[in-house]
Image (cartoon, rainbow, N blue to C red):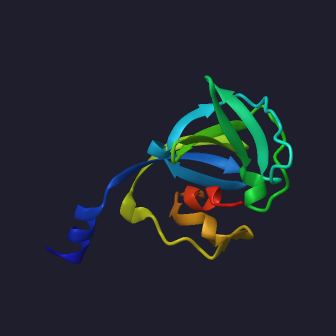
Amino acid sequence: MSAATATRAKSVEIQLATFYVGDLLLALPIDYVQEINRNLELTEVPHAPEHVRGVINLRGDVATVIDLRRILGFSPAEVTPQSRNLIVRSSDESIGLWVDQIADIISISSHEIGPAPANVSGVEGRFFKGVYRTESEIVVLLDTGEVLSID
């Protein structure tokens, strides 16, 4: 078996949920995403770090909402008609990632993911797992473990 055939054999189809934070097109594997939520009415948390926007009631559970713009070094997010909370699971907790706009769900092969650059649009590379190039854009895979480890 040739090396190219072996690589294709090991390649796995991945579905990614894509979304924008500023002009940056980011993605998470679809199985990380619990739901996409329009609830933007947050309860502020006193003395919380500046990247914590607040908490929301998620059908009886409390979910902390993180402003991805702040974590990635952009100005704070503003509420727009396109703003959404991308709800992900971390350990046994639901976490909301405030994003500027939801994009598409794309299916790619795992071998199409390239290494993450040291920085993307001035953002630290530690928040990224890799990149995927479409015909017109670069999709950056977000490392949720790194994002959620911020104190």
Nearest to the observer: residue 120 or residue 86: 86
Left or right for 79, reference 108:
right
| Residue 141 locus on image (x, y percent) | 55, 59
Please state the horizontal and vertical placement of residue 11, each as a whole percent of the image.
30, 61
Horizontal side, residue 12 vs residue 20: left or right = left
Most extreme residue toward the front, as rendered? 47
Question: Is the residue 135 above or below the residue 62 in the image?
Answer: below
- Count the labels in the image: 0
Foreground pick, 48 / 11? 48
Q: Is residue 147 above or below residue 89?
A: below
Q: Estimate the x, y position of residue 38 in percent, counting from the top left.
A: 69, 29
Q: Residue furthest top?
A: 59
The quarter of the displayed image where residue 26 is located: bottom right
The residue shown at (68%, 27%) is 57
* Quadrant in the rendering for residue 39: top right
The structure residue drawn at horizontal position 53% and vertical position 50%, both measured from the top left corner, is 28
Q: Position of residue 144 (x, y in %)?
A: 57, 55
Residue 142 makes an appearance in the image: no
Quadrant that contains the N terminus: bottom left
Residue located 50% across and 72% down the image: 115
Along the line of sight, which residue is nearer the eye, 87 or 140? 87
Q: Residue furthest left?
A: 1
Q: Residue at x 56, y 58 (%)?
A: 145
Asked if residue 72 shows in the view, the reply is yes
The quarter of the picture where the C terminus appears is bottom right
Task: Name which quarter of the figure residue 53 lies in.
Answer: top right
